[in-house]
Image (cartoon, rainbow, N blue to C red):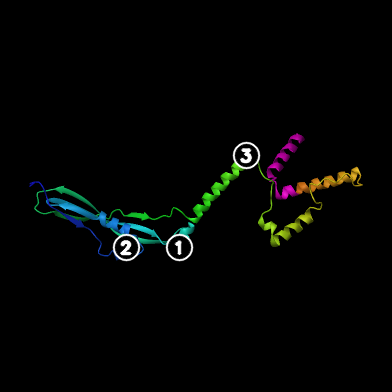
Amino acid sequence: MDQNARSSSFLKVSDSENGYLKKNISSIFLQSITQSNTYEVLTGDSVSLYLGRSIRKIIIPNWKAIMGFQPDYDIKPYLTSRKAASRMQYSSPYITIQPDFDITTIEIEQRTHTVLNSLGLLGGAWSLAAVVYKLLFGDDTIQPFGLVQKYGYFYKKTQKKLTKVLSTFPLVQIPDSSNNIDDKNRAEQLDKKIDNLELFLRDYVVEVQQLDKVYNNIENVKDK
């Protein structure tokens, strides 16, 4: 028989008011709390237990958590402990318990997949695909109008505004030379179409602020 062999026992630290932990919490987490607060104590050891408390914030499942907004949390405080042991010549374990509440650990649960995160990933993939497409094949035709201007009340309003402002349609069609129109009238029509086209581009397609600055700079140089 080994004379140095010592008997052992198990010491379990638990909270007498932990009934709230059993609501809306996983059994795995409860088991981890039990295991982390269970210690093997050998006969003759001097054991010091330091008791503390941690807080876990568990997400309450609802639409905010799924979408990716700031979720609502169910707060679950639970008991923690740590052991410090030294070998002494006692006939039985000598155990002391001390509070250790100076620092409280807060664990916040977070969702890794939400609707907003998924939309962000899709948007990034779409942007990358658009850049690659433009790099390989160039830009498509400029389309200044969106769905609001293409359908319903705003569509009619847009059409009335364009008809009122731009008197010549279509803007880019060259007059047919086979018609009985003299060169002077044809030139006047082309000038009018060019003026309307420039007006359309300034109002709906081209950002003209920088172009205006360049034009002003050129005029200033000419004056000098």
Label ID, residue 193: none
Above-or-below relation of 124 to 37 = above
Residue at the top extreme, as displayed: 224
Picture quadrant where residue 50 is located: bottom left
Mark 1 is surrounded, within 10 Å at the Cα level, by few (under 14), some (14 to 19) or many (20 or more) other residues, namely: few
Residue at the front extreme, as displayed: 1
Describe residue 123's horizontal placement relative to residue 220 as left or right. Answer: left
Q: Secondary structure at mark 2?
A: helix
Q: Secondary structure at mark 3?
A: helix
The secondary structure that most of the magenta stretch takes on is: helix
Residue 207: within the magenta? yes
Residue 114: within the magenta? no
Q: Mark 2 or mark 3, which has the lower sequence index?
A: 2
Q: Mark 2 or mark 1, which has the lower sequence index?
A: 2
- Name the residue tied to disc 3: 136
**Image position, residue 1 (x, y; %):** 7, 47
Identity, as a three-letter code, of the amino acid under mark 2: Leu
Q: Are marks 2 and 3 in contact (CB under 8 Å)?
A: no
Describe residue 98's horizontal placement relative to residue 161 as left or right. Answer: left
Q: Secondary structure at mark 1?
A: loop
- Name the residue tied to disc 2: 21
Tell me how many marks there are.
3
Q: Which range of residues does the magenta coloring cover?
A: 200-224
Picture quadrant where residue 38 is located: bottom left
Identity, as a three-letter code, of the amino acid under mark 1: Asn
**Separation (CA) of disc 1 from disc 3:** 44 Å
Identity, as a three-letter code, of the amino acid under mark 3: Leu
Identify the residue shown where x is 80% and y is 45%: 194
- Name the residue tied to disc 1: 62
**Separation (CA) of disc 2 from disc 3:** 59 Å
Quarter of the rendering occupied by the C terminus: top right
